[in-house]
Structure formats: structure tokens, C-alpha cells
Amino acid sequence: MPDKPSITVCDATLRDGSHAYSHQITLEQVRTYAAASEAAGFSFLEVGHGNGLGASSLQVGESLVPEGDMLRAAKACLRRTKLSVHVIPGFATIQRDIAGALEAGVELFRVGCHCTEADITQRHIGHVRSVGREAWGVLMMSHMASKDVLLEEAKKMQSYGAQGIVLMDSAGAYFPADVTEKIGLLAGRLDVPVGFHAHDNLGLSIANSLAALEAGARIIDGTAKGFGAGAGNAPLELLAAVLRQRGYPTSLDFYKALDVAEVAAKLFAGSLPSASGITIVSGLAGVFSGFAKPVQRAATQLGVDPRDVFFELGRRKVVGGQEDIILEVANELARRKNGANPGAPAP
């Protein structure tokens, strides 16, 4: 049997976890966690606002600490592990945000977009490559497109210079067979490595991550203790165990990869995600996991069931960046509840 390929393991704890922490991660938490991630030997550590560079705002949440300060604090703790950021054109500008990240020492820019809108990433990917830094393309909410559409969009990103392509299960909506179908096609048809970013809304993050690896993914994302949006991500400590047991070579120190979970548990106590009725419905409805907290707030404010809000958002095919629609939906459900047509719609 041929040897299994080496896997790049990306630690998104200090980025996706920002959603779970209402973007209030402190510099001391950044430093403490970054040191643990470095010791564990993760390939990349992603840092910043949950929605990426330049996203701190009233609409999606303001970061406690300025972006540049977070990046510099993390970079100072890293030697082998490389610093990465998530970039969504529309939030992140080239002149302000990417330039600032370059100055802070970011080595990898993961440029993301809704899964059918790869065209908007061309300038950002091209710019990052032109200044000699690494760029990957990230297709978010990838459950909303067929495997053939995803391949077409991924090929665009590859043509722009992306050196890797990552499919994000942003809603935690995938089942393993879906992952096998989509990752398998991309891995077989692209010239760059393919990756997978799981969420655990339906309790399938590890199963889906393993399906991605077995279908040809060479990049896998996770967070310590699953610290991330919605029900969280694939827990890095479990990924480390599965990778070890299945014989995939990585750069990880296994025991120290387990230790990052204990570090995260102490640093972010009280905010670690877990499955709930809301996150489960989010996965079933195929709605962005980062909507969990704003949906809960709007539902509480207007006296409606947050699960009904999620199902209605799913019907409307709302995606990240459309947070303003959450309040609109909650208002509409409240009017139905109190008006001539009482009761929220059944799922």
C-alpha cells in the first residue's frame, strides 16, 4: 500500500472562535493561545475577526482589539507555524487591510467568497501573489452549489493564482457522502491542493473531515475544543487523533496538539460552543453558523422562536454578510404571531 500523503493542518481557533466570543478576544489570549499552537506544530494559525480582515463593524460585530495588534501579537509567538488571515473582498480592501496584514507579517491570505462568486476574488488573490505571499481560494457556504459549479468556481481561483482551494461547510450542513462527492471531484481535477473546513451543527465535523481526507483533501481546518461559530468546528484535538490513527503524516506533536484543547478550555471558559436546538436547525436550514448569536438576540428581542428564524433564513437562502435580514425576518415572524395569521411557519 502506498504511503499516505502529508496533511496540512490549519488552526482557525483565533479567527472562527472570534464568532463564539463575540469578537472580544484579548491580546493576552492571543499570545497565550498562539504559543500553544506553535508548540503543537500546526501548519498555519489563522487570526482575526470572525469574518476576516476589515470586518470589524457595527453590522457584524466590533473587535475588542485592533486587527494589526492581534496579528503582531500572534506573529511574535510563531516560528514554525505560519500566520494566516481570512479575507473576504467587500470587507477587506487591498490598500488598507491587506497592506496592514503584510506589514504585520502575515504569510498566508485565504481569500474567500460565497461559493458561486469566485470572480470577486481575482484582484485580492492576484495582489497577494504579486507581492510574493501565499494565497488560497476559499469557497464559503459550499453546500449551496453543485459539485460541477464548485469545480468551475475553484478553477477560476486557481487561474487567478490561488495555491490551494478550501471548501467551507459554513452552515455545518454536509453529510459525509456530500463531502466525498465534492472534494473528490475537485481533488481529481485541480492542480493545487484541496482543503475542507467543517462545522459541527449536525455533529458530523470529524466524520466529514475524514471523508474529505479520504476523498483527496490535503488541507484540513479545525479549532481547539471546536471553538468557532454555531456548534463549533472540527475539534483539533480529535482531528490530531484521527490523523494519527489513520496514518496521515503531519507536522504535529500529538500530545501538544491535545494540550491546545486544555489551553482553549481555560482561555475561553463559558464561551466554548456546543450543540443546541438552534445550531441543529441552523445546519438543517443550511444557514451560516455565524448567525447563531444575532438570531438569538433578535428572537429574544421580538419574542419569536429562533428556530423559526433560522428556517425562514434558509428558505430565503440568506448568506454571510446579510445580517440585516435577520431582524427583518424576526419582525415578520413577530407580526404573524401577533396579527391575523398567528404562529410561526412550520419547518
Image: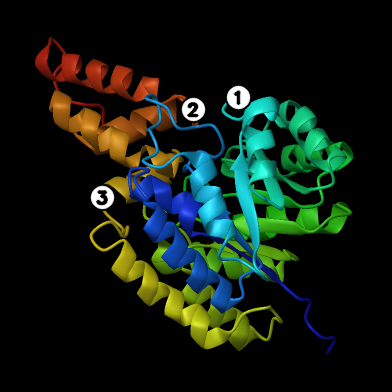
C-beta proximity under 8 Å, tags 1 and 3: no
The span from disc 2 to disc 3 (Cα, nearest Å) is 23 Å
On the image, the x and y values in percent for residue 281 come to 34, 45
C-beta proximity under 8 Å, tags 1 and 2: yes
On the image, the x and y values in percent for residue 128 come to 78, 40
Q: Of the residues shown, which amino acid type is indicated by label 1?
A: Gly
Question: Which mark is on residue 321?
Answer: 2
Residue 58 shows in the view: yes
The span from disc 1 to disc 2 (Cα, nearest Å) is 9 Å
Q: Is residue 71 left or right of residue 337?
A: right
> Badge 3: how crowded within 10 Å, few (<14), some, or many (20+)?
few
Q: Of the residues shown, which amino acid type is indicated by label 3?
A: Gly
Going from the N terminus, do you reach mark 1 or mark 2 first?
1
Going from the N terminus, do you reach mark 2 or mark 3 first?
3
Residue that numbered label 3 is attached to: 277
Residue that numbered label 1 is attached to: 90
